[in-house]
Image (cartoon, rainbow, N blue to C red):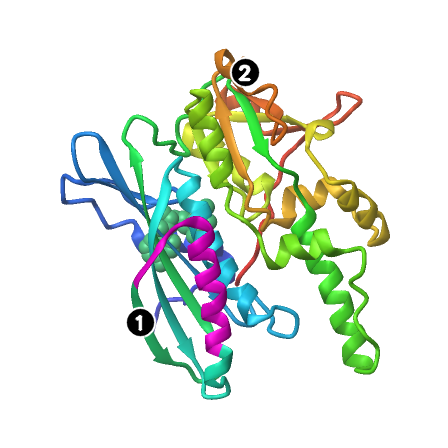
Amino acid sequence: MENKKLRDLAELGEFGLIDVLTQDFQLKNKNSIFGIGDDAAEIRINEEESLLVSTDTLVEGIHFNLMYMPLKFLGYKAVAVNVSDICAMNGKAEQITVSIAVSSRFPVEALEELYEGIHAACEHYQIDLIGGDTTSSLSGLMISITAIGRVNKNSIAYRSGAKENDLIVVSGDLGASYLGLQVLEREKEVFKTNPNIQPKLDGYDYLVGRQLKPEARIDVVDQLSKAGVIPTSMIDISDGLASELMHIAKSSTCSVSIYSEKIPFDEKTSLTAIDFNLDPITCALNGGEDYELLFTISQNDFEKIKTNPNLSVIGHITSKDSGNLLIDKNGTAVNLKAQGWKHF
Ligand code: ADP
Ligand code: MG
């Protein structure tokens, strides 16, 4: 290592780093159907079914700030984001393990609060806490959750199955979580300069709620199943719509065209974006943490979903060389760029 120029993590980025670290690993066991590169790994358990396994880690100061993230919400969110990854495979989460690293600055009561949130999420999503690990950390709090789920092998949705002319669909509305974070950050700054001023969160319940207590869309997975629709590809929106669209395009060797007018927003998102001098479309594309589902369906399935108020068709899949496009209301197309979250 001494004579080689050492590479900077920031240069590679999160996905580049994962590629570099994992490139020499091949799957050896016949039941390991799919490893790295989707929302969850797939392990065949019998003729019909697969297990799904996904891990997500939340680190104090990177993914959450305890100044405005109550520990109970943090516990809930840590579970929800993992359940969301199982949903993104069209599966049902059934178990979790929870690992924490804590510094001595946290009293027992604080960790009990964290576990109250984990408990509430386990009740809400009907999942079992089956283990984990507890260790100390020098300063902050880290929580890492592994979710295990189940899916019928014929209903599994990978990122890689999108076909030309498929419709691109998104659940719920986008951009709210990012704006909720902006509201919380703004109030934090006010509080820092004058701790006597109460935070002004009135009227921002929806946005702040989307940031502090996101829900995994188990309801959407259920509705698709009842409607008899198996998405041709699916991913959850953790890093922002643009980044997730590009994951689907890359994995499916295709391109995407989406229409800015079709992106679903809550009214509060559009109004608050103006306050912050932000374009709601940018919030949806690059904000992240919406934990909605982004998926593609065959055009033949459109009739089965068109009356579902939770779902919006935002575009369609095109050939690989068409480029990933965002088309505005005048028909002008620009290339989609993914910023996503930059951890490094
Ligand atoms: P998601 O955003 O859905 O949680 P990630 O972007 O975190 O997914 O991860 C992408 C893929 O890379 C996943 O298959 C994940 O399991 C894998 N991965 C991430 N980090 C590592 C690592 N350090 N070692 C091995 N695999 C990893
Ligand atoms: Mg995911």
Does the numbered disc 2 mark a residue whose Cβ is under 8 Å from ligand 2?
no
Q: In this view, does 286 lie to the left or right of 41?
A: right
| Front-lying residue, 47 or 275 | 47
> Which residue position is annotated with label 1?
133
User: How far apart are the alpha carbons under marks 1 and 2?
Assistant: 45 Å
Position of 100 relative to 301 (above/below): below
Q: What is the span of residues highlighted in magenta in the rendered image?
A: 111-130
* Circles 1 and 2: CB atoms closer than 8 Å: no
Looking at the rendering, in which quadrant would you find the N terminus? Answer: bottom left
Residue 151 visible to an observer of this rendering: yes
Q: What residue type is labelled 1?
A: Asp
Q: Is residue 336 above or below residue 189?
A: above
Q: Where is residue 6 in the image (x, y as percent from the top left)?
A: 41, 67
The residue lying at 66 percent from left, 41 percent from top is 174
Q: Which residue is drawn at 21% across and 45% down?
A: 26
Inspect the image, locate mark 2, and give the three-letter code of the amino acid beneath it: Phe
Magenta residue check for 127: yes
Q: Where is mark 2, residue-wise? A: 302
For the stretch drawn in magenta, what is the main secondary structure? Answer: helix
Picture quadrant where residue 137 is located: bottom left
